Amino acid sequence: MAADARGLTPPAPGAWEGRPAGVSGAVPPPSVPLAFLAAASFGLVACGGAWLWARGAAAMDPTADPVVAAVHFGVLATLSMGVLGAMHQFTPVITGRPLRSVRLARATFVTWLAASWMLPLGVATEQLVVTAISGALAGLAVVLLVVNFVGPLSVRGKGAPVSALRFALAGSVLTGFLGVVFVADRQGNWFDLTGHVDLAMGVIGLFGWLGITYIGVAEKLWPMFMLAHLPGRHVAGRLAVWGVASGVALFTPGLAWNVPGLAWAGAGILTAGLAAHVASLLAHVRHRRRKADLHLAFVLTAAAWLAVSGCLALAAALQVAHHHHAGVALAAAAMAASGGWLLEALVGHSHKVVPFILWSALRSRGIATGPAGKPLMFADLYDHTWAGVAYVTVTTGMAALCAGLGASTPAATAAGGALLAVTGIVVAANLSVVPLRMLSRPAVHAAVDVAVSGGDGLAAS
């Protein structure tokens, strides 16, 4: 899309009409990312319920169909849905270029929503036709995603965040292809999808797509949310992106084809990349100008889940040759802890990102004051006590789930599932009740339009 005389890229067709001052023309309408993020909350409720149902099967066999269904509710309907929302919101922000089409974004949402629910439900009910349709829909959603994002991600420069998003787009394609293979195997049992092959697929999805997306977007969000300016050249973020991408590229074929040397080399590089990610986080924390708050607790706890995952993965690798069931159980717990890294980050950042988006939507409706009659701020759009409740439930829920899977204890697995379901309900309600109440009021256009940029608004919140 050609730039105008001022060097600015015009908004994509179907772009947001009536956007308030200070919001980039490349940013899509609020309904695009909010649809993904809202669906992610409902996906978390379904994931929690699925773990409650799968608690007994998980203790006996972590690869059983009820467990596979619960995992896919978590990975597809929750984490992938939330990450897709972040990609649609922040790729235009990071690159300065709009998506190819807002309609493509909405089509991606509809197809991914259907696929992310149909696949685990098809697995749980052993309906092969449902899983086949879900695989086709997931493949279509990935194609739509690529078509929509190739343009903005073709921009040069922009550093680690854009590199991460490019790797993530490639990871989404590979994950989608492997999903089709998974569905095909359930249809005809054509492939030998052994445990280590399933694990390789999980590593690609969790780290090669979802994880690297979070790493890239976080490099853009942490300076803004923490008011952190890092002096000099910041190389940790770049090392994190390339380390994770390179590690996944070596680790997964080593796992899939059972080549221990390649797998261990890839695991080492992946670990170094994740360590660089944590180092980048700690550098932002050290240079932050915002006092410690709940968002900081979320992101630090998310990083702690990486350490837990690494310890569990190492224990699984050492144990599986001697006690197969115990090793597989520990591997399942390690993958759950990796999911905890992303889930904790998703829930924490949603309490910043959703109000950030809703603020613009409310301003476009002429709502310029908060509940107290003062200028509307992001922090006015949710209850901070309930946000704290969400932190407790998601953290304890993931801890219980990891303990239940690792120790083959159904009661702990069930407790984890229940707490995750509660988290989804609390987050959805907390981030929607206040804005909906404000939207129900008659629109009042401010006499003087206060142009607040994203950074200034965050600082004021």
Image (tube, grey):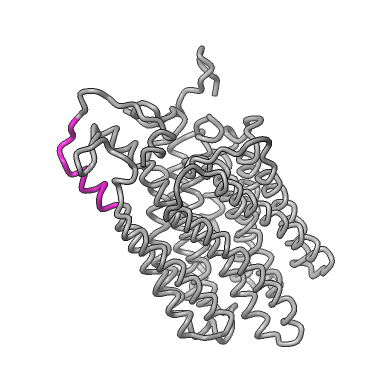
Q: Quadrant of residue 368?
A: top left
Q: Position of residue 205 (x, y in %)?
A: 61, 59
Q: Nearer the viewer, residue 440 or 368?
A: 368
Q: Count how many numbered circles sit on residues in the image.
A: 0
Residue at position x 28%, y 38% in the image: 376
Where does the C terminus fall, quadrant-wise?
A: top left
Where does the N terminus fall, quadrant-wise?
A: top right
Residue at position x 62%, y 30% in the image: 155
- Residue 63 part of the magenta-drawn span: no
Is 182 displayed left or right of 299 in the figure?
Answer: right
Residue at position x 62%, y 80% in the image: 329
Q: Position of residue 19 (x, y in %)?
A: 35, 29
Can residue 411 be seen? yes
Q: Quadrant of residue 21?
A: top left
**Extreme left residue here?**
442
Instruction: Work out whether 327 lies above or below 40.
Output: below
Q: Which residues are magenta?
A: 432-444
Instruction: Work out whether 334 lies above or below 356.
Output: below
**Extreme top residue here?**
5
Q: Position of residue 448 (x, y in %)?
A: 24, 23
- Residue 433 part of the magenta-drawn span: yes
Q: Quadrant of residue 49?
A: bottom left
Is 27 displayed left or right of 429 in the figure?
Answer: right
Can residue 88 be seen? no
Q: Position of residue 223 (x, y in %)?
A: 53, 41
Residue at position x 40%, y 72% in the image: 419
